[in-house]
Image (tube, rainbow, N blue to C red):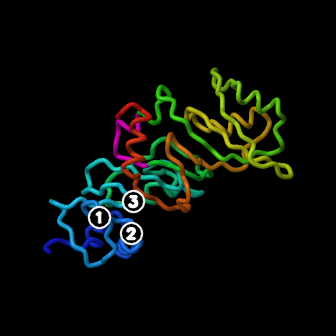
Amino acid sequence: MAGERLQKYLSRLGLASRRAAEEWIKAGRVSVNGLVVTELGTKVDETRDVVRVDGRRVKPAGLPVTVMVHKPYGYVSTTRDPQGRRVVTELVPQGWGRLYPVGRLDYDATGLLLLTNDGALAHRLTHPRYQVPRTYRVTVAGEPAPETLRQLTAGVELDGRPVAAVVKVLKREAEKTVLELTVWEGRYHLLKRLMERLGHPVLKLKRMGFGPLRLGRLARGAYRLLTSEELEDLQAAVGLK
């Protein structure tokens, strides 16, 4: 069969190193023309064959790409930082071309962050009009009283307008409480300022969900392409499908 070895093709597209691509193939994460491939000698022709990783079609650079990243501590959600800090785009292969963070996670926050070159999708995911939910695991100082949690659910004024959250208490520990908070906008330092106003400063913050997506078991610092189903669900959530 003429063509290029599958692991070399994946590496050339900038999806992973050749060794990492080989591990993907052996783990059954790669399919060619709908069939899962586990043989490293498999060759592909990019003009004819359809290659998918984790169900998401891979294509040459320049076409729409949307990636989920598990942002670690110490990275800023931008493509360049004047202070010389590490940026989230360093976490994904450069062969995908220029990708931009969808919204932001603070320098000291972790969790689900999307990077994409699809401007229309990014705009709708971040615009308040589309009410895309964000779910966070938030550790706060102290033990919020039931009345405080009811106030948070009803809405707290911030920047001249109310912010409401769906609240679930996950764990109560000595001098701190772990909450699950879902909000429908991404204002600057939103949850930190909100909880500070209620008298329970945020100690730790991790985004667990964004729209229909969930972080799942993606390791900290790791990335993956969205599957076709995930991308369709995301587009549907903002009226693009």
Residue depicted at x 44% and y 51%: 80
Answer above or below: position of 240 versus 92.
above
Q: Check if residue 118 falls in the magenta segment.
A: yes
From the viewer's side, name the closer residue of 83 and 33: 33
Front position among marks 1 and 3: 1
- Are the residues at dot 2 and dot 1 in contact (C-beta closer than 8 Å)? no
Q: Residue at x 50, y 49 (%)?
A: 113
The kind of secondary structure element at disc 3 is: loop
Give the amino acid at mark 2: Gly
Of the residues shown, which amino acid type is indicated by label 3? Asp
Q: CA distance from mark 2 to mark 1?
A: 10 Å
Dot 2 crowding, Cα within 10 Å, few <14, some 14–19, many 20+ = some
In the picture, measured across the screen, residue 142 lies left or right of residue 136, that is right
Cα distance in 3D space between marks 3 and 2: 9 Å
Q: In the orientation shown, which residue stands out farthest toward the top? A: 160
Of the residues shown, which amino acid type is indicated by label 1?
Leu
Where the C terminus falls, by quadrant? top left
List x then y, in percent, for residue 81: 48, 51
Is residue 238 found inside the magenta-colored segment of the image?
no
Residue 8: x and y, percent?
A: 27, 72
Mark 1 or mark 3: whose residue is earlier in sequence:
1
Q: Nearer the viewer, mark 2 or mark 1?
A: 1
Q: Which residue is mark 1?
A: 35
Q: Which mark is residue 28?
A: 2
Near mark 3 (Cα within 10 A), the count class, few <14, some 14-19 or many ≥20, is: some
Instruction: Looking at the image, tell me whether mark 3 or mark 2 is earlier in sequence order.
Output: 2
Quarter of the picture holding the N terminus = bottom left
The residue range painted magenta reads: 115-123
Instruction: State which tag comes first along the sequence, 2 or 1.
Output: 2
Residue tagged 3 = 54
**Residue 192 located left or right of residue 134:** right
In space, the residues marked 1 and 3 are separated at their CA atoms by: 12 Å
